[in-house]
Image (cartoon, rainbow, N blue to C red):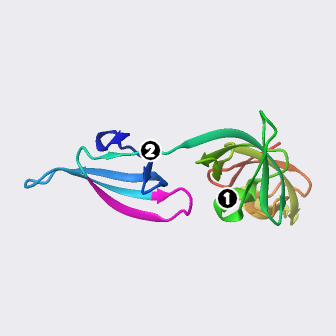
Amino acid sequence: MYSTANFRKGLKIELEGKPFLIVDFLHVKPGKGGAFVRTRLKNMETGQVLEKTFRSGEKVDRPDLVEREMQYLYQDAEGYCFMDNKNYEQSFIDQEHLSDSRDFLKENIDVKMLFFNNKPIGIELPIFVELKIAQTDPGVRGDTATGATKPATLETGLVIQVPLFINEGETVKIDTRTGEYVERV
């Protein structure tokens, strides 16, 4: 159990049988009446954000969350298939639980999968991934003085901005937190 004194950004709690992530919180002590904690919570299953107020000292449950090292295998009609690196058990997760993470998924990439009551609810990507440029226009000579960029389509279908010297077929390192080009590999 967590008390409201333990609240911090990123803390995972359970409310009404559902896992929530604390996005923001504020301890409030009015001049009259008891203190309380105003929070902004994100449902980890649906992504819905809600605001809830807790009385000071109120207790909330700790969710049954398990994080496991998994490897992405393939995508089919059931969803995205991942394999546990320890026991080779396969788990499927649907597209809505992946949100923007699917733009960085390449076969055989290792990720951390989050399970709530033995049901997959999301993944955590590595900070950097290496993806191949599938399509981009050639850079025009003379445009490099300003550090210009051009759009490039990656092998996963994601379109990002890359420097003009990057060509088709090259592999680039992408920051999964921001979706930006980092360097050529």
Q: Residue at x 34, y 39 (%)?
A: 6
Instruction: Give the image location of residue 82, x and y in percent.
Output: 78, 48
Q: Residues within 10 Å of mark 2 (few under 14, many from 20)?
A: some
Q: Is residue 148 left or right of residue 38?
A: right
Residue topped by disc 2: 11
Q: Amino acid at mark 1?
A: Leu
Relative to the observer, which residue lies in front, 178 or 17? 17
The overriding secondary structure of the stretch rendered in magenta is strand
Q: Secondary structure at mark 2?
A: loop
Instruction: Give the image location of residue 134, x and y in percent.
Output: 88, 60
Q: Is residue 135 magenta?
A: no
In terms of image quadrants, where is residue 161?
bottom right
Q: Is residue 1 left or right of residue 172?
A: left
Q: Residue at x 67, y 55 (%)?
A: 179
Quarter holding the N terminus?
A: top left
In terms of image quadrants, where is residue 8?
top left
Q: Amino acid at mark 2?
A: Leu
Q: Residues within 10 Å of mark 1 (few under 14, many from 20)?
A: some
Mark seen at residue 98 = 1
Q: Earlier in the sequence, mark 1 or mark 2?
A: 2
Evaluate if marks 1 and 2 touch, with contact meaning CB atoms under 8 Å apart: no
Rendered view: 159 above or below 64: below
Q: Residue at x 63, y 47 (%)?
A: 118
The residues colored magenta run 42-54
Q: Is residue 44 magenta?
A: yes
Q: CA distance from mark 1 to mark 2?
A: 20 Å
The single residue placed furthest to the right in the displayed view is 169
Relative to the observer, which residue lies in front, 150 or 60? 60
